[in-house]
Image (cartoon, rainbow, N blue to C red):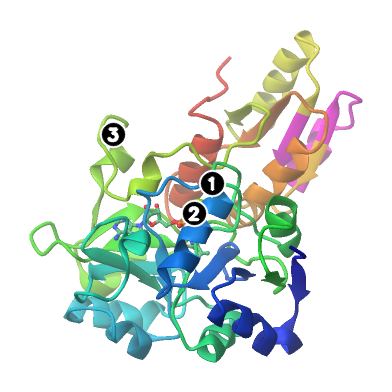
Amino acid sequence: METKRFTAKDIKEAAAYLKQGELVSFPTETVYGLGANALSEEAVRQVYKVKGRPSDNPLIVHVSGKEMMKQYIAELPMVAERLIEHFWPGPLTLILPMKADTFSSAVTGGLSTVAFRMPDNELTLELIKEADVPLVGPSANTSGKPSPTTADHVYHDLQGKIAGILDGGAAEIGVESTVLDLSDPLGGPTILRPGAITKEALAQIIGEVSVDQHLLSEKEAPKAPGMKYKHYSPEVPVWIVPNEVQEWRRAIEWAENQNLRIGLFSSEEVLHLLGKNSLIEEYSFGENTVEQAAKQLFSGLRALDDTDVEVIFAPAFPETGLGEAYMNRLKKAANQKFFKN
Ligand code: TXA
Ligand code: MG
């Protein structure tokens, strides 16, 4: 199959493919999604197949707004109403009890709840409206690889396997949405996956928010099935380095002593201070902020993985605000390996 490249002028054509049950990747503010008609079990099964995704891992249903979502839920709790008011369109996924006989178990992984999100991307909102159906949209990467943040990343992974890719440029945020479970009236609102909408931001709108135990302790089983899988992993081992120049120097020295070719995912400032070295391949994420690091983490890991480096170093940032989501993804990519001297 030829994978077409769509732009803004091709939205009708892209929507027609989706209506026929074909797969089209779409841009969002977080990462690119692999779109399929959520109401077609066959189309949804194709998503798992193309990604190589375990079938017990439920999908997020992308909607054009609250009205579309309401058709598929048993009721809309007040907290959800308030969160939607503040954060949609945006990187916040809400898990709610599903209305009976709406989505197939291919979407929900057999659960009685569904995850919904309204992405903050004009092209994609238009695509959903044009297709006139909700779209499932897991990240459009091969399962286990870093999520795609550009159309080229999607093309690299899924070329020949899907009908097309709607190109909306590079994703603004770079890490997937915050997943918030609102389906448990006893447990209260619970974050299952950290994202750009932070715990603090949520708490300002709805008061107390808890965090799934597995995010705090390795031993707990995650409530979001997808969080248990190995994720975001380049082929090359990744190590997390404290973001201080002397620590970067130590890490480089350690790798040099083993004659390893080194990939550095780092800020312009740090790369400048470290200087050039023939064993080193650099990926600069620009300004030394967690926003820039998060935005380019997956892109950087992919780019360095495509070179001949044998080890990748990436910086730790404090685990507050967006740092929680960034460190959650980086720790998975690094398989929890922290560089300590
Ligand atoms: O930013 C994002 O959310 C991106 C873009 C494309 O929208 N999508 C994305 O989808 O990250 P995916 O499929 O890679 O991640 C969905 C996560 C998984 O960890 C899954 O287990 C969890 O949400 N999830 C989905 N439905 C759930 C449910 N009913 N209960 C608990 N967790 C659920
Ligand atoms: Mg994913």
Judge: label 3 CB < 8 Å from ligand 1.
no
Residue 52, label in figure: 1
The magenta stretch spans which residues?
263-281
Specify whether residue 258 is painted magenta.
no
Could you say whether the residue bearing mark 3 is in a helix, strand or loop?
loop
Q: Amino acid at mark 2?
A: Tyr
**CA gap, disc 3 and disc 2:** 29 Å
Q: Quadrant of residue 60?
A: bottom left
> Looking at the image, can residue 318 be seen?
no
Q: Amino acid at mark 1?
A: Gly
**CA gap, disc 2 and disc 1:** 6 Å
Residue 48, label in figure: 2
Mark 3, mark 2: which one is toward the viewer?
2
Q: Residue furthest left?
A: 186
Disc on the earlier residue, 3 or 2: 2
Residue at figure coordinates x 75%, y 80% from the top left: 7
Q: Which residue is mark 3?
A: 217
Location of residue 167 in the rendering, given as x and y in whole percent from the top left corner:
72, 72
Depth order, front residue of 322/213? 213
Q: Looking at the image, do the residues carrying marks 2 and 1 touch, with CB atoms under 8 Å apart? A: yes
**CA gap, disc 1 and disc 3:** 28 Å
Q: Looking at the image, do the residues carrying marks 1 and 3 touch, with CB atoms under 8 Å apart? A: no
Q: Amino acid at mark 3?
A: Ser
Residue at figure coordinates x 51%, y 29% from the top left: 335
275 to the left or right of 148: right
